Amino acid sequence: MIAYIVRRLFSTIVVMAVVAFVVFSLLYLTPGDPAAIIAGDIATDEDIRRIHARLGLDDPFLVQFGRWLWSLAHGNLGTSIFTNLPVTQLIGQRIEPTLSLTLCTLVVSILVAVPLGVVAAAKAGSWLDRAVMSFSVLGFSVPVFVFAYILILTFSVQLDWLPVQGYRSFRDGVWEWLRHLILPSIALGTVYVALITRMTRASMLDVLAQDYIRTAEAKGLAPEQVLIGHALKNAAIPVVTIIGVGVALLISGAIVTETVFALPGVGRLTVDAILRRDYPIIQGVILIFSAVYVLVNLAVDMSYVLFDPRIRLT
Amino acid sequence: MSPTWKRFRDAFRRHPTALVGGAILIAMVAIAILAPWLGTVDPLAVFPSQRLHPPSAESWLGTDMLGRDVYSRVVYGARVSLIVGLAVAALSTLLGLAIGLVTGYVRRLDAVLMRIMDGLMSIPSVLLAIALMALTKASIGNVIVAITLAEVPRVVRLVRSLVFSLREQPYVEAAIAAGTTLPRILVRHILPNIVAPLLVQGTYVCGSAMITEAILSFIGAGTPPNIPSWGNIMAEGRSLIQIASYLIVFPGICLSLTVLAVNLLGDGMRDALDPRLARRM
């Protein structure tokens, strides 16, 4: 088990190094003078020179990369070109709505998707199974912002049940906070639910065909006991894996969802940064989101130890 | 008829939804190509006196805040989605195939290239595309390149794993024993067995590329505003959702329908090519 954990930790470090290198070198791989691109169409030579100096673009590439890594190790993600504030501070100010949205969606999606997948597998071929599978194809096809607008038009504009957009901090009251998160979470969660449901169903169908399931049924266990205690536990690894992989969908989706619902989160910060060509912010956001994604998947790999005793023994 | 085609035909018979998907897709391609002859006007023509007219007999899907005809814009918008979807699917499968074949066969390159692919795959694809678009000028070509780079690692993974299992097959070992050269093994024995799963992966890449293009355009990092695309039509309607929801609804329906068609087609093809998987999914 120790060897497994050490191996996973090591490969995580390698992956993070590659991510850092890619995020850094994008600025140099793209054609043209990065300073001129960042400065935009109406920049003067003076502006471009200033950005050159600011980003240290006149030094050799590896010197720049080394300097960037060094400040990264000190928790410094650089300074926004537009606002002149540290990127870490800007992201810190915007983290609460994004965390609220993604965590809410994550928890609710898993609570909905896993039972849905289990039921669909248990009643494979029934109308319920077909309905669940149709929903999952639809979930993959309707883009998050299209679905978000359908929800807004129905529940906010027509029925007037929920706010059209905006965010309230949970310090202003849990109900107000939750009320503003219901529609964004449903919109963001749909594709995630579709993904997890599909995988749960497929994995359960595999396990349900095994001999030990027949044995469990033959010795007279209740169907629920077989389904949860025997089948779901053995079907867990692919499901947990897809939950981790799907976090990428949540991260990408959060940017769009925050734009639709005007949530002042990290996604909104990114979109504003794109419009202002404020590359240090984009760089910082990508690095942090990718790090979160890598760490989530590291945690997923570690959780295999709980489900598969074979890993514990090696 | 070759067995593969027979399997395709049987699968389509078993999955009428795949046929529906194919039909919708063909219709969309026809609409995109025939756009100028489908009762459209210039999608960029501005009529300030006719701003924000709701759908009516003259302008079927209404007009936007500059008086442009939404129907014409949506019809022309089909071109962007289809071009981006098909180009990204073609480019990323070809590029992924080339890199995957090499990494599957050259051990020393494999270690290095796969670490790079792992790193690229750890950056959520929309974010990677956003970063690339933030550093280049907005154009359809750049959108295609940005999305392709974000999609390639997944194709490489697929091809590499297929190559790994194929090179253990007795007929490949027999070919090696008979002294067949490496390029010939790759082309004659490995490639034909990769084409089918790659085609299926290509359809899913196509669908996801269409969604990514729309997302990029929607947040202002994609197709430039002077080319109507479903994503940027919706972006322009963003602040008008409460008074002119048709600006969002119609391009949204078209986009969802097209992606759905591509996904249904992909599901049908996957079932045709992998009957074992078909029973599970």
Image (tube, coloured by chain):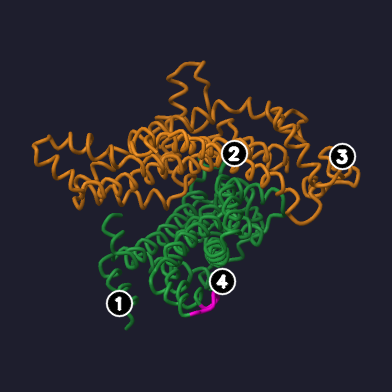
Chain colours: A orange, B green
Quarter occupied by the C terminus of chain A: top left
Please indicate whether residue B127 sits to the left or right of residue A66 in the image. Answer: left
SS class of the residue under badge 3?
helix
Q: Mark 2 points at which residue?
A: A13
Question: What's the CA distance linking mark 3 and mark 4?
Answer: 50 Å
Q: How far apart are marks 2 and 3 (CA)?
A: 31 Å
Quarter occupied by the N terminus of chain A: top left
- Chain under numbered label 1: B
Q: Name the residue under label 3.
A: A53
Q: Residues within 10 Å of mark 1 (few under 14, many from 20)?
A: few
The first of marks 2 and 3 along the sequence is: 2
Q: Which amino acid does label 3 sit on?
A: Ala
Q: Do discs 3 and 4 share a chain?
A: no
**Chain letter of disc 4 in the image:** B
In the image, what residue occupies the spot 33% across and 44% down? A197
| Quarter of the figure with residue A52 | top right
From the image, tell me which residue sits under label 4.
B36
Q: Where is residue B255 in the image (x, y as percent from the top left)?
A: 47, 56
B216 relative to B205 in the view: left or right = right
Q: Range of the magenta residues?
A: B179-184
SS type, badge 4: helix
Subunit of label 3: A
Q: Mark 1 or 2, which is nearer the eye?
A: 2
Give the amino acid type for the residue marked by disc 4 in the picture: Pro
Tell me the residue that label 1 is attached to.
B6
